[in-house]
Structure formats: structure tokens, C-alpha cells
Amino acid sequence: MQRKPNYGFERSERAKTKAQKKAEKLQAKAEKTAARKTDGDETDATESED
């Protein structure tokens, strides 16, 4: 016998996983941006000293 579909729960689970993936991507992007900014600051400081 097949199970009764629970569309609301399944949709909320898909939305939850989608939101989690989006949050992970945004966090990775923010870390990459922060790393780029700190690397850029260091190179600018060394270039201005020369």
C-alpha cells in the first residue's frame, strides 16, 4: 500500500534545503570577498611604501 502524500511537508523540506544552500553560498561569497579585501589592503600598503 502506498503512503499518503504530504505535499505541505515535502514542500517545506525542499524550501528548507534550498534556503540552507543559499545561506551556504552567501557565506562562502562573503568569506571570499573578505579574503579578497584583506589581500588587496596588504598589497596596497606594500605598494605605497615602495
Image (cartoon, rainbow, N blue to C red):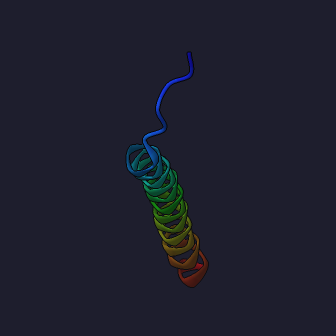
Report the front residue among 28 and 5: 5
Looking at the picture, how far across and down is residue 49, in whole percent? 53, 79
Please state the total of marks drawn on the protein image: 0
- Is residue 19 or residue 37 the one in the foreground? 19
- At which x and y percent is residue 47? 61, 78
Q: Position of residue 41 (x, y in %)?
A: 49, 74
Furthest residue toward bottom: 48
Tell me: residue 50, above or below residue 25: below
In what quadrant of the picture does the C terminus appear? bottom right
Q: 33 or 15, which is in the foreground?
A: 15
Residue drawn 51% across the image and 54% down it: 18
In the image, residue 34 lies at what x, y percent?
46, 65
Residue placed furthest toward the front: 1
Q: Residue furthest top?
A: 1
The quadrant of the image that shows the N terminus is top right
Residue found 56% across the figure and 79% down from its top: 44
Q: In which quarter of the image is residue 15?
A: bottom left
> Which residue lies at the image location 48% right of the left edge and 63% below the top edge?
26
Q: Nearer the viewer, residue 27 or 44?
A: 27
In this picture, residue 25 sits left or right of residue 27:
right
The residue at the point 56 percent across, 67 percent down is: 36
